[in-house]
Amino acid sequence: SKEKDDDEKGNADWKAFEDAVEASCNNIGVETKRLEEFTLTGGVTETSATGLRLSLGTREGIGLDDTYWIEEMEETESGQIIRTKRGFVKIRAVADNKRNESATSYAQIITGTDYSAGLSATELPLPGMNALFSFGAFPARVSAFNAGNANPPQFNLDNAKYNFGVNVNAESRMAYGAMAAFQASLAHATKISELWFHLGLNVGVTKVDGMFYLPASGGGIDSANIGASWTGSVNAGLLKKFYFRRYGFILQADVKYTLQRMYAGGKDPGDGADITYKLTNGALGFDARAGLETYLTPTLSFGLAAEFNFFGSSNAYTALVSDKSNNDITKKTDIAGPDLTYGGLGYYVWINYSIPSFF
């Protein structure tokens, strides 16, 4: 019970149990609706160029942005009923047919043509969650720093024997990589059609033309190319979609935290063991995105977008030296390095998949 779970961890186990039960109940509800005996169906009562009226409403428990197949029912000579899908629609206005039995809900046509009164509407049960997979280019502008200097000033670390220097010979402008994101519909909660919560993670690389100058084992200086530097970000925010047929216009705004790390392998100047030198910069900003998305099927869509990122410029880094087990040997914050900004235009293409059930 909840009372017995109040131990030194508080009610963490009970909360996990409640979350698991809630997810299971939601899954059961979604899966039950897929059984023919429990599938929610209604009829088309009116048609227009962009939408349909359906004989469904609050009495049947339909919700904003729910998806329905529009089907034609045909009976064969043997008496078998055959369903032919004509296309699908999404509910945009839910009728209160508890108070007014003749009230009908409005559904926007996404795909299909030649609709007419008398066709059948069958729910496609979806929990309102999307998984998005994307490839793109996003800004990570690293300015030239100590350009052409083969003996640049060293960063002063807490342990001076690991002091190292860096130069960047030419400006680097973009990172290229992949994004994974989760989207959750807020339509039922807010009564705003096609309003979504977004949580995304970008991982990419920026090619930096520069060198690390590292203390060598036994004395002297070693050098190593910077090359591909890891650039990543996490963002969370809201997006709104506006559909005309299968085509959607998307507006999105997020809070974003972006991180870049330049690194190079070297040898410990004392015992010669393998170590890694890292130079890391992180910044908090915002992004605004506009794009187009098109439905391929009711559960799969393709999109592309341009994004503008709002970040200031910074030259504050954390310099870190770690061993091969990634344990810190020494570090120093607020190191003055090359100017870096994540502000500017980015571009993305993606595939968006409607998850069929809760986790």
Image: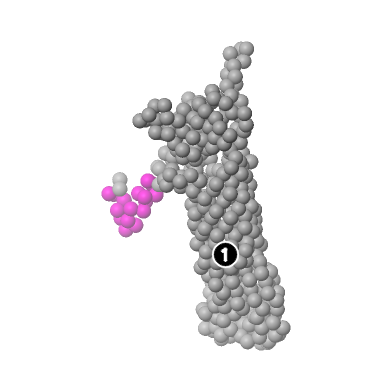
SS type, badge 1: strand
Report the front residue among 266 and 89: 89
Report the front residue among 26 and 190: 190
Q: Assess whether residue 295 is covered by the magenta stretch.
A: no
Residues packed near mark 1 inside 10 Å, few (<14), some (14 to 19) or many (20 plus) = many
Report the front residue among 304 and 216: 304
The x and y percentages for residue 348 are 63, 56
Give residue 104's quadrant in the image.
Answer: top left
Image: magenta residue range: 3-18
> Against 170, is 174 above or below?
above
Q: Residue at x 49, y 39 (%)?
A: 92
Badge 1 amino acid? Asn
The x and y percentages for residue 287 are 54, 62
Tell me: 90 left or right of 188.
right
Q: Residue at x 64, y 52 (%)?
A: 304
The x and y percentages for residue 217 are 66, 83
Q: Is residue 294 visible?
A: yes
